């Protein structure tokens, strides 16, 4: 990625020029928010789950004039919330996933949020920002997300500073903007192959949920839901050709229960009672649940129950390899994951699991080569940098081992939002690389870029 020139480090104005805001600046903002969210929020680090939703996000984004996606972040929070950020970033709470009835409903929320960005609604809130620029907007988004984490604790919200407190003034879209995002979002989701009725269904689900409780979830503070919007959404969906929805979607049930487990929102009792009703998704989720508890016997027993029913599901080898790794059975883990990774080399979760097995087996070069392919495509991949750091840490043969370990550590720290620590690691690497011209030049360039971006504050 090219380093930012000095001229580009000025905070972009949110005024009239925003329509011309170049993609480089938007990309910068998206990346800044990506780092901030990782630093300040409890995020789910799970390549399989992230990539399931990233595919949906990319599919909808490709219907717009917006650029390449930066990434998707899943936040561990049972509240229903999601937001899109200029520059191609999407964040969603686990609560949004677990409250939806199908993937199309989640696609509807994504499409609506993406429409707010594609229609530049954030720039029309110009008055509220008094020209503080897009970075102020990004700060408010993060502040709002943190405030919702504080879960009604006013003291915590005040400590977050005024940004969170101002959130309802600054980020509530006008009714017309909401209706525009519904209309355009529905076109996006339909064009991407999702059922437009699901947007209307989800509004109705939400309306029922909010009318039962006295407080509104944060999402509806910023996106006021009116009966008018609900009926318009239904009418609009009825005008589009029908898209057939599955009556029961096992894949989505798996996605939903898996999300509950990895975000620590599932109880053993809850999963057990579903499994007793012969729910395949719950049996698989129980296997993951016991795996996380370190109970490998129970994890294996539950996995064995669903192996034949789900023989083509990627989670089967992923969980099986983890059960073997937990028991230090490296050869079995390798035999489980290697054949399937060969048939699906583009699958990041399988490749990273295989890399993990290879690291444990001491096959350092192979593990590094596997991960590098993904890092080349996406330098914001925290898990990839962490795996490279682990592998290189064991690579005693390389004369540049210490420098590389520091470089990989710096990237993992940087994209996790710890910009200062990353810069310290890079400075350390810079000292160790003295005398190696090629390596020094590479480090100097990346360090300068980190320092420039660090100066831009949200």
Image (cartoon, grey):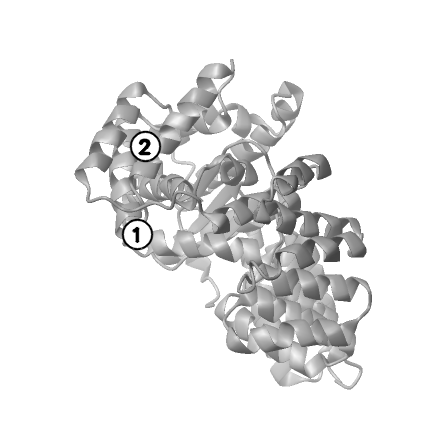
Residue located 39% across and 32% down the image: 202
User: Marks 1/2: CA distance?
Assistant: 16 Å
> CB of mark 1 within 8 Å of CB of mark 2?
no
Residue 362 is drawn in which quadrant? Answer: bottom right
Seen from the viewer's position, the closer of residues 173 and 199 is 199
Q: Which residue corresponds to mark 1?
A: 193
Q: Is residue 331 above or below residue 28?
A: below
Q: Residue furthest top?
A: 214
In screen coordinates, is 180 left or right of 128?
Answer: left
Q: Residues within 10 Å of mark 1 (few under 14, many from 20)?
A: few
In the image, 249 versus 226, the foreground residue is 249
Disc nearer the start of the sequence (1/2): 1
Give the percent coordinates (x, y) of residue 115. 31, 42
Q: Residue at x 68, y 67 (%)?
A: 387
Mark number, residue 240: none
Percent x, y for residue 233?
26, 31
Kindly indicate the quadrant of the structure image that contains residue 146: top right
Q: Is residue 367 visible?
A: yes
Q: Count up the numbered dots.
A: 2
**Horizontal arrangement in the rendering, residue 276 relative to residue 227 (left or right):** right
Extreme-left residue of the structure: 239
The x and y percentages for residue 79 are 55, 31
Tell me the element at label 1.
Answer: loop
Relative vertical location of residue 436 with respect to residue 388 in this rendering, above or below? below
Q: Which mark is residue 200?
A: 2
Residue 395, quarter of the rendered image: bottom right
């Amino acid at each position: 990625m090219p380093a930012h020139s000095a001229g580009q480090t000025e905070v972009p104005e949110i005024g009239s020029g925003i329509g011309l805001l170049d993609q480089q600046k938007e990309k910068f903002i998206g990346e800044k928010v990506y780092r901030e969210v990782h630093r300040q929020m409890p995020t789910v680090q799970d390549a399989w789950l992230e990539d399931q939703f990233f595919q949906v996000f990319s599919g909808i984004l490709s219907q717009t004039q917006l650029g390449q996606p930066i990434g998707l972040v899943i936040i561990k929070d049972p509240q229903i919330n999601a937001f899109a950020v200029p520059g191609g970033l999407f964040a969603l709470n686990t609560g949004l996933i677990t409250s939806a009835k199908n993937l199309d409903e989640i696609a509807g929320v994504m499409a609506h949020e993406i429409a707010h960005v594609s229609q530049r609604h954030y720039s029309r809130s110009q008055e509220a920002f008094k020209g503080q620029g897009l970075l102020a907007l990004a700060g408010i988004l993060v502040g709002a997300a943190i405030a919702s984490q504080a879960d009604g604790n006013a003291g915590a919200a005040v400590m977050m500073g005024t940004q969170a407190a101002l959130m309802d003034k600054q980020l509530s879209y006008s009714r017309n903007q909401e209706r525009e995002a519904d209309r355009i979002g529905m076109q996006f989701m339909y064009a991407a192959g999702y059922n437009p009725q699901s947007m209307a269904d989800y509004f109705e689900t939400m309306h029922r949920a909010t009318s039962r409780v006295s407080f509104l979830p944060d999402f509806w503070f910023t996106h006021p839901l009116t009966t008018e919007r609900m009926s318009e959404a239904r009418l609009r969906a009825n005008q589009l050709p029908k898209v057939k929805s599955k009556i029961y979607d096992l894949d989505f049930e798996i996605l939903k229960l898996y999300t509950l487990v990895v975000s620590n929102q599932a109880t053993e009792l809850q999963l057990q009672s579903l499994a007793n009703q012969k729910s395949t998704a719950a049996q698989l989720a129980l296997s993951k649940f016991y795996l996380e508890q370190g109970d490998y016997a129970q994890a294996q027993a539950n996995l064995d129950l669903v192996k034949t029913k789900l023989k083509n599901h990627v989670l089967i080898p992923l969980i099986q390899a983890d059960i073997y790794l937990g028991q230090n059975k490296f050869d079995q883990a390798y035999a489980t994951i290697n054949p399937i990774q060969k048939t699906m080399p583009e699958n990041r979760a399988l490749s990273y699991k295989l890399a993990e097995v290879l690291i444990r087996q001491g096959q350092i070069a192979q593990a590094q080569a596997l991960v590098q392919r993904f890092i080349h495509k996406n330098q914001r991949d925290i898990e990839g940098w962490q795996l490279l750091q682990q592998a290189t840490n064991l690579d005693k043969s390389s004369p540049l081992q210490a420098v590389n370990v520091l470089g990989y550590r710096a990237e993992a720290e940087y994209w996790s939002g710890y910009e200062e620590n990353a810069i310290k690691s890079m400075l350390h690497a810079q000292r160790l690389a003295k005398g190696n011209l090629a390596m020094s030049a590479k480090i100097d360039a990346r360090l300068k870029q980190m320092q420039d971006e660090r100066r831009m504050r949200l």
